[in-house]
Image (cartoon, rainbow, N blue to C red):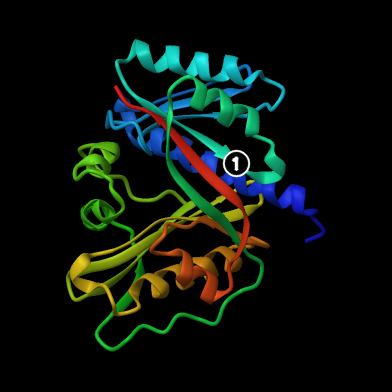
Amino acid sequence: MGWSEDEVAARCHANCIEYAREGARRAGAAGELLEADGLVVYATGSDFPVLANGAFRLDPSIAADEAVERADAWFAERGRGWSLGTTGWNDGDRDLIDAALARGLVTVTDQPAMVCTERLADAVAPDGIELRVLRTEDDARAFVAMADAAYTSLGLPAGVIPAMAGSSPQVSPPHLVTLAASDGDELLSGAQVLFSHGIAGIYCVGTAESARGRGLAELVTRAVTNLGFDGGAPLVTLQASSMGEPIYRRMGYRDLYRYATHARFV
């Protein structure tokens, strides 16, 4: 690979930002995405501040106060709250975090950004469970419904993910692959892998509450991780929830930096 840890961290953060862009694009007419003067802001079909509406500073030379003020103004025009994504790598966003907190944003997540640099042992589905890449609109709707219910365990209100997806959830484009574990017609668990910036990132890992405790989250994460490597990525990254962190670490992911989100609620 030949990349320094600084380069790895930069690519992982860029992949995370690209997933946010993808969310705005996939929202269709309900989504907005603007990049200008070192800042990216995005909105989806949901007005919930966290995950669905947010901002990232792309250029670290942009003054932190200016970045927060510009994002505040953009979302105020839309009558929405929003969230600011920050990376803890080498304390590079410390000024941004301080500016956000000084302006009244609240830290809502602080989780490890993790990285895996070697292909894992292949996922083996238990009897009765089928692992497959999702390809149809019906598949997309089933995945959205599963993720919507699953993410309430992490504090996301029901209905946010369907609103983000819009009335017609889209089949994943080639650079964003969605994989699921199903029992017959019932989709029980799933995850996505996004290819960008020369690497792959894992997102939206979720399992239906009724299917938890069966190892399905590890099953789908292991499978999409290997899809990333098989697709040519030299490393795979993810941001771990408190539920997923011990699973990912056991699989072979390691901590790279902390990843925090700070929200403005209106």
The residue lying furthest to the bottom in this view is 127
Q: Give me the residue at 41% from left, 84% from top.
A: 124
Look at the picture and state if 128 lies above or below 192: below
Circle 1: residue type: Thr
Q: Nearer the viewer, residue 114 or 161?
A: 114
Question: Disc 1 designates what residue?
Answer: 87
Look at the picture and state if 123 lies above or below 263: below
Residue 42 horizontal/vertical position (percent): 43, 27
Q: Nearer the viewer, residue 231 or 117?
A: 117
Q: Quadrant of residue 139?
A: bottom left
Residue 262 horizontal/vertical position (percent): 45, 34
Q: Give me the residue at 62% from left, 49% from top.
A: 12
Q: Give me the residue at 27% from left, 44% from top.
A: 161
Residue 129 horizontal/vertical position (percent): 28, 80
- Quadrant for the C terminus in the image: top left
- Quadrant for the N terminus in the image: bottom right
Question: Which type of secondary structure does the marked residue at label 1 adopt?
Answer: strand
**Mark 1: few, some, or many residues within 10 Å (few <14, many ≥20)?**
many
Q: Nearer the viewer, residue 81 or 221?
A: 81
